[in-house]
Image (tube, grey):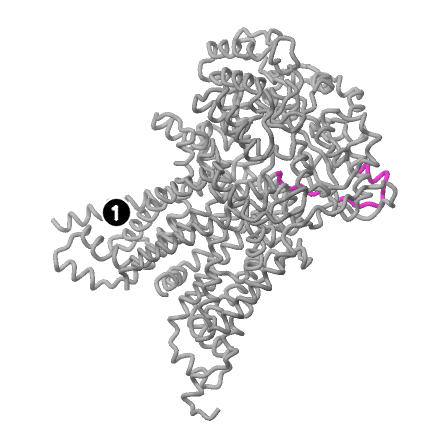
Amino acid sequence: MTGGPRRRARSFSRLTPYLFIAPAVILFSIFTIYPIIASFLLSFQTRQAGSYVFAGLANYARLISDDYFLTALLNNFTILAIQVPVQLVLALLIAVGLNSALVRFKGAFRVAYFMPAITALVAYSVVFVILLNTDFGLVNYFLHSILKLPKIDWLANPFWAKVGLMMAITWRWTGYNMVIMLAGLQQISGELYEAANIDGAGTVQRFFRITVPMLKPIILFAFILSTIGTLQLFDEPYILTKGGPNNATLTAALYIYRQGFQYFDFGYASAISYVLVAIIAVLSWFQLKIGGADSD
Amino acid sequence: MIERKNLIARILLFAGLIAGAFLSLAPFYWMFIAATHSTGEIFALPPNLLPGKHLLSNLANLQAEVGLARVVFNSTILAVVYTIVTVFLSAMAGYAFAKFQFRGRDAIFFGVLITIMVPYQATLIPLFSTMAKLGWINTYKAVLTPNLANAFGIFLMRQNMQAVPTEMIEAGRIDGCSEFGTFMRIVLPSMRPALAALAIYMFMFQWNNFMWPLVVLNDPKMYTIPVALSSLIGLSRIDYGQLMLGASVSTLPIMAVFLILQRQFISGILSGSVKG
Amino acid sequence: MRKTSRFVIWSLVVLTLLAGFSGIAGAGPNKAVAGKGLVKGEITVWGWNIAASGLKDTVASFNKKYPDVKVNVVDIGRLDLYDKVTTALAAGVVLPDVIQIESDHMAVYTEQFPNGFYDLTAVASKYVKDFDPSKWAQSRVGGKIRSIPWDSGPTGLFYRADYFAQAGINPDEIKTWDDMVEAGKKIEKTFGDKVKLLNIDWTGDDALYRMMMNQAGAFYFNEKGEVALGSDTSIKIARIIKSLKPYSFNTAGSWDTTVTATKNGAVASIPFGVWYSGTIMDQAPELKGKWRVMLLPALTGGGNRASNLGGSTLVIPATAKNPEAAWRFVENALATTQGQMVMLKKWGLFPSYLPTYEDSFFREKQEFFGNQPIFAIFAGEVKDIPAVNYTGDFSKAHQYVINALTQLLTQDADPEAVMRKAAKDVAAATGRKLAAR
């Protein structure tokens, strides 16, 4: 009350920050936190004759011996192990290329690469289902009629369905990650590269000695985003392959949808969801630990 | 020698980038071309890669089937309103999280962030029954409110707001601005790139949002583009020319928004991902 | 900090308590349509595609009888409709007054939401004798009528008369599925790789399996609700399907592939429900006069050749605002010859309402099918379709069977091993008993 101007400038009503976050936090509590808690409680319940009864950990216990769930998780991790690194490396290479002084039309390229990420799911799905059609699709037409290669069962062969799925995801998200990395590259000071040039470092050395280390926080950010996205992967398998053939592209999120919306086992679906949340949390924590340990 | 090597590198790099851009854009080209063909022509072999003659008839069919003008209008209004409100709420919350010390700050912020990990399939039903209890089913309120407070938006704004110099805020206070006035007149204007980046994200999100509008909207007159397009995909008799035209229409506005705002977009993402 | 943590914890506790009272709706009381109330106001009807179009065309005759009811028929895509209905039923929320549900999905819904739909027993009992008896097995749950059968899907083998003639196949000599294998060889000899005898979905659906099981009066589950995938019949059918594989065109879960293969002449025959006749006429008008229809071959010489694939019902959700008017609408559309004939003639929706079969339309020769009276063939088959038990676990079991067939057809798995395994897995996933073989 008696402070001078300096003190007055620093102080703010204790209520102020709460007022600033209030609208968001209230909406968030009602429409995000509350449904999450409700569905979490549901994971301890099971349906009997149309009503829900408490079932303890039965839903969670059931998960352990559920082959389909384990297959789905394995698929998620396969995609995580193969598609995510490929996508991030591609994104990084394109970003470095676009950042190089040698290239013109940067704006046009940026837009071209980012375009797939902004396409509506419905449009994307219809286009890819037709393009990848085994007998009448454009992709096989080029492989078979023009390059004289055998036709590939893109969506119906267990191996190729996985490949096709990963191709589609890569198509959709590489540009998105590229833009994130490009933003990071523009932060790296040119002086670092000049110094390296004087030391006689080649392109490859500069890439590994300067670009990659300087970009580490950004790569980590993109990696965590991609990890969460991959573990929650739903759109592509739902539309392109319906999880088939023979569960080759079944993912955990698709399995949650099936258990809930096709088999009406919402309790079990919730249990799967929270196991998935736990896995994502643990993975993200490890990624931060490993990635963050020697930065800063 | 160096010149020559440089030239080769340049050509190779350029060729690689062109090839990648071609792969990125080819499906769009095909989609736009398919929008001018009939279903039979779309499935024909060898494929039709040049514009056909059915654009106008596809357009007429699409208008008759889903009321194209109407759903485009609905989508636009929803996406614009959503974008404005969300960006504003996110900026307010992000500002408080970045620039104020207060009890529970980190706990609440962390609580907001961690919800990103929950798959939406899990919360769809409880959210829907909340809407039902509020009596909001089949209203635009129900489409908009669940994601108005957006974890990603709050995160992005908090990261960006940390760059706002504290002196600037204090100057505002000394000048006698209210806290809210300071935020409106001093903080927000300095945040334009970040706001633009978030606006693109949020516009994209709402424009393409499918599952939620599908379950809460029952009246076809209120449908958004993705929901209307999806209603064209039934068990039999899909008119692909019409569908491709609808898909093209759903893509063009986003392309335009991105083209206009792309510079700000990149610098906005930048500060979101680096700091913190 | 401690104060805030306490605040956060308490908020969570309150939210949790609130959440405990919400989420998913319980069973609710059984509601029945009395058929006595005033019929006026407004009703909303959900269906998809041609079914919605068909219902729209019955509104005129309905409004002649009940001029005070305004009817809104809304066309919602099939998968979208199920997502919306499931969400709403689970949350116990108001749905429209009438909804289309496929017959095979009925038990899935009624088992999980026992009182989710109006009990129509009181008003619909008088019509029981008028509908395809095999359809009631899906519409009646625990002795109560929860839905009214709409269209039936009596099956047949659509075939290209010109291809068969070229390959020297006499369609009258195809009596069993084994005869089909022989026909497949002839087609292969004549056309090489260009034309296959029939379409089979190797990886995306089990339509052929279901049709054959239905012929044998069997299904995933027996009449006691036990898992019957490992039965001798089931294994035999898996064997037949595997023997047909070399002569089949794989449609891989894609409807468009099926239609395009039909149009492009990549298949010489298509085993499907009557509803496919409309698709052929619609999508391939240039093939007029080339197609014919016969009943599906039997599993054994002289065996049953009738079965059903597909078909829908109409339900009135328990949350409907205007159930009396809804019932009158359903009655007019489905339980009158006039309503059903409109939908058949214009949209090819094949009625399960038996009195319609007396209509002269059924005896008409169809020019497209070389002047065969194809609807008479399908109508004649209906009385022989065995009723089977779909159960509330249809959707779950469906996925296991599709996967079993995928292994059978793409990984050269042994029919017996694969069906036995599927039976065991379904029993485990559903908590049902394995049927004795």
Q: Residue furthest front?
A: A56
Q: Is residue C284 left or right of residue C62?
A: left
Q: Position of residue A255 (x, y in %)?
A: 51, 41
Neighbour class for label 1 at 10 Å: few (<14), some, many (≥20)? Answer: some
- What type is the residue that disc 1 sits on? Leu
For the C terminus of chain B, the quadrant is bottom left
Q: Position of residue B137 (x, y in %)?
A: 66, 54
Instruction: Compare residues C420 and C316 and report the one nearer the observer.
Output: C420
Vertical placement of residue C219 versus A271, above or below: above
Range of the magenta residues? C60-78
* Residue at (44, 43) in percent of width and height: B28
Q: Position of residue A173 (x, y in %)?
A: 40, 48
Asked if residue C74 lies in the magenta stretch, the reply is yes
Snapshot quadrant of residue C287: top right
* Residue at (60, 19) in percent of width and height: C212
In this rendering, does residue A27 appear at all? Answer: yes
Q: Position of residue C140 (x, y in %)?
A: 74, 32
Instruction: Compare residues A241 and C413 and report the one nearer the observer.
Output: C413
Q: What is the chain identity of the residue bearing mark 1?
A: B
Question: Element at badge 1?
Answer: helix
Vertical placement of residue B155 versus A267, above or below: below
Vertical placement of residue B69 versus C12, above or below: above
In this rendering, does residue B32 appear at all? Answer: no
Residue designated by label 1? B13
Asked if residue A128 lies in the magenta stretch, the reply is no
Instruction: Compare residues C91 and B30 and report the one nearer the observer.
Output: C91
